[in-house]
Amino acid sequence: MLVKLIVIALLLFIVINLFRAGLVMVRQPQPEVKMSRYLGRRVLFSAIVLILIFIAQALGLIEPNPRPY
């Protein structure tokens, strides 16, 4: 249960960073705020989510859905 909550929190953080990058993109260019910082965080946390899911599945903390056939 804890692993699922952590994954959900990370996914929300990814979406928030995506929207923040979008806001920076539509605003006037400001030298102190860079869009690549938010997009880089999004990519980093996406990789962390994937690694966390693979590790949790390998340890048996989560189970994949059974095959449909």
Image (cartoon, helix red, strand yellow):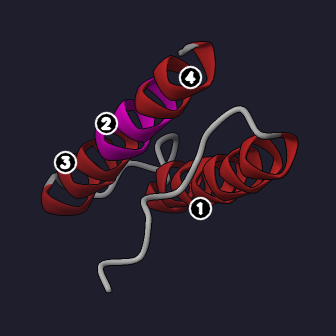
Marks 1/2 in contact by CB < 8 Å: the verdict is no
In space, the residues marked 4 and 2 are separated at their CA atoms by: 15 Å
In the rendered structure, find residue 23 and report the number of the disc placed on it: 3
Question: Which of the two residues, 30 or 61, is positioned nearer the viewer here?
Answer: 61
Q: Is the Cβ of the residue at disc 4 closer than 8 Å to that at disc 1?
A: no
* Front position among marks 4 and 2: 4
Q: Residue furthest bottom?
A: 69
- Three-letter code, disc 4: Ile
Q: Earlier in the sequence, mark 4 or mark 1?
A: 4
Residue at the disc numbered 4: 6
Badge 1 or badge 2: first in the primary sequence: 2
Q: Are marks 3 and 1 in contact (CB under 8 Å)?
A: no
- Element assignment for label 1: helix
Number of the front mark, 3 or 1: 1
Sequence-wise first label, 3 or 1 = 3
- Local crowd at mark 1 within 10 Å, few (<14), some, or many (≥20)? some
Magenta-highlighted residues: 9-16
| Marks 1 and 2, how far apart at CA | 12 Å
Q: Nearer the viewer, mark 3 or mark 2?
A: 2
Residue 15 higher or lower than 34, as above or below: above
Q: Residues within 10 Å of mark 4 (few under 14, many from 20)?
A: few
Specify the amino acid type for callout 2. Ile
* Residue at horizontal 86 percent and vertical 40 percent from the top: 59
